[in-house]
Amino acid sequence: MTLAEAQRLAQRTADAVREAAQRALTDERCSGSAADWTIIEFAHIRALQDARRAEVERRAAEEKLGVSREHFVGARTRAEALRRVLEVRRSEMRVAERLTEHKEMDEVATLLRSRR
C-alpha cells in the first residue's frame, strides 16, 4: 500500500469514526409505544456497535499508515544515501579528470621545453 493510499484510508476511517460516534450520541427517544422504544433501543445498540467497528478499522488503518510511512522513510533514506554516493563519485571523477588534464599539459610543456 502506498503512503498516499494509506493516508486516504486513515482519513476515511477517521471520518467514519466521527460519523458513527455522532450517530451513537444521538438520542432518538421520544414519547411513543413500547415497540417504538424497542426499535429505537436496537438502533442505538447498532449505532454503538458501528462506532466500535469503525474505531477498530481506524486503528488498523493507522497501523497501515505507520507501516507505509516507515517504508517511505526507508526508501527516502536509501535514495538520499545513493544521491550522496553519486555526488561523491562525480566529484572524484572531476578531480581525476582535472589531474589527468594537468598531467597531459605538463607532458606537453616538458616536450615543448626540451625542443628548444
Image (tube, grey):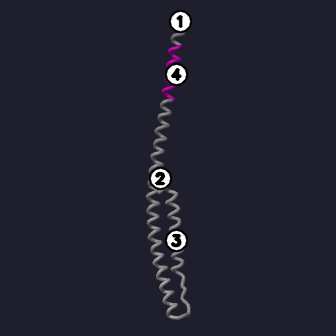
Which comes before the other along the chain, label 1 or label 4? Answer: 4
| Residue for badge 1 | 115
Q: Amino acid at mark 4?
A: Glu
Please state the horizontal and vertical placement of residue 41, each as a whole percent of the image.
Answer: 48, 86
The mark closer to the camera, 3 or 1, is: 3
The mark closer to the camera, 1 or 2, is: 2
Residue 3, placed above or below residue 28: above
Q: Is residue 99 magenta?
A: yes
Q: Amino acid at mark 3?
A: Ala
Q: Which of these two is toward me, 34 or 91?
A: 34
Task: Measure how far apart labels 3 and 2 are at the Cα level.
Answer: 26 Å
Residue span colored magenta: 94-108
Task: Measure how far apart labels 1 and 2 are at the Cα level.
Answer: 64 Å
| Residue for badge 2 | 72
Which comes before the other along the chain, label 4 or label 3? Answer: 3
Please state the horizontal and vertical placement of residue 17, each as a whole percent of the image.
Answer: 50, 72
